[in-house]
Image: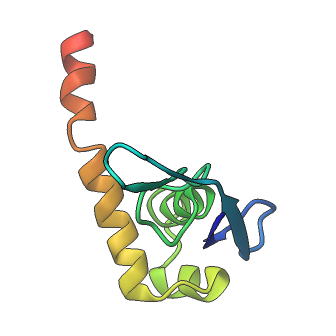
Amino acid sequence: MAERSVLDMPSGKPEKVLFRLPKTHCYKCGRSFTSPAPGVLPKSLYGNQLMANAIAMHYFYGVPMGRICESTGVGSGSLTEIFHRCARLFESVPQRLIEEY
């Protein structure tokens, strides 16, 4: 079992969540594989719910980043990186929506 801790907001208040993830071993190639944590992007320290709440607070409701940092316990640099990472993930979505329309 591998353990991975993530900061998330499942109930509106930020809390640390510890996932116990099964780990398997491939006997052919000799590599170890760990299951992904549910509701967390790969190589992320923050859960999807916390990221979605921070983005909605800032871009939809106009809450300043300083206030989001205080309420979530996430630093301003990490918060900026969350915003940039989500922007990179959804960069191609508007063009695809236009094409489908």
> From the image, which quarter does the N terminus lie in?
bottom right
Q: Please name the residue shown 42% across and 57% down the image.
A: 42
The residue at the far top in this view is 101
Residue 77: image location, x then y, percent: 36, 86
The one nearer the camera, 74 or 69, is 74
Asked if 100 appears above or below 38 in the picture, the reply is above
Left or right: 25 as drawn, with respect to 1: left
Task: Identify the coloring.
Answer: rainbow
Write the residue at 45% across / 66% down: 44
Q: Position of residue 75 (x, y in %)?
A: 47, 88
- The residue lying toward the viewer, choosing from 49 and 63, is 49
The part of the image, by quadrant, that contains residue 52 is bottom right
Q: Residue furthest right?
A: 11
Residue, x 52% and y 62% (percent of image)?
A: 51
Q: Position of residue 60 (x, y in %)?
A: 50, 55
Residue visible at 66% across and 82% down in the picture: 71
- Vertical order, 2 against 35 (above or below): below
- Please tell me which residue lies in front, 20 or 88: 20
Q: How many numbered marks appear?
A: 0
Task: Name, please, the residue furthest toward the front.
Answer: 27
